[in-house]
Amino acid sequence: MKQKNRFQLPSGALKKNISTGQQIYEKNCASCHGIEGQGKIGPRLRARLIPKDSFFNVIAQGRNSMPAFRETLDGDQLEALWSFLQRPLTSENN
């Protein structure tokens, strides 16, 4: 029997996590980073590899004119947001 990677979310759970991340992004990030993450006032967040630990640190602490979200977003929300931004680019979800 093939053993599953214990760190990989099942596809249904991953889709839910991405959907939650999209909601968080639209509420907290899109005004500065663009609705598609293409960059606006803040830098582009899509189509680039963002190390998770660096991402979590910047979101929690803030950077330059970006506010800190450590009091606003919990660990599960940060994980969902990161999953949303790091999802593969396709014609359906870029």
Image (cartoon, rainbow, N blue to C red):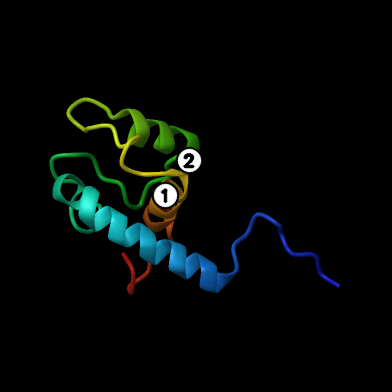
Residue 82 numbered mark, or none? 1
- Residue 9 location (% of width, % of height): 59, 62
- Residue 4 location (% of width, % of height): 74, 64
In-front residue for pair 72/60:
72
| Residue behind mark 2 | 52
Which residue is at a point 32% across and 52% down the rendered structure image?
A: 46
Which residue is at a point 25% across and 52% down the rendered structure image?
A: 37
- Residue 93 figure quarter: bottom left
- Residue 6 location (% of width, % of height): 71, 57
**Three-letter amino acid code of the residue under disc 1:** Trp
Along the polypeptide, which appears first: circle 2 or circle 1? 2
Dot 1: what SS? helix
**Decide: marks 2, 1 in contact (CB < 8 A)?**
yes
Q: Relative to residue 92, is residue 5 drawn left or right?
A: right
Q: Residues within 10 Å of mark 2 (few under 14, many from 20)?
A: some
Tell me the quarter of the image containing the C terminus: bottom left
- In 3D space, how far apart are the residues under numbered discs 2 and 1 (Cα atoms)? 7 Å
In-front residue for pair 8/16:
16
Q: Quick check: 32 above or below 57?
A: below
Residue 89 makes an appearance in the image: no
Residue that lies at the very extreme toward the front in this rendered image = 71
Q: Relative to residue 43, is residue 89 drawn left or right?
A: right
**Three-letter amino acid code of the residue under disc 2:** Lys
Residue that lies at the very extreme toward the right in this rendered image = 1
Which residue is at a point 39% across and 57% down the rendered structure image?
A: 84
Which residue is at a point 23% across and 58% down the rendered structure image?
A: 36
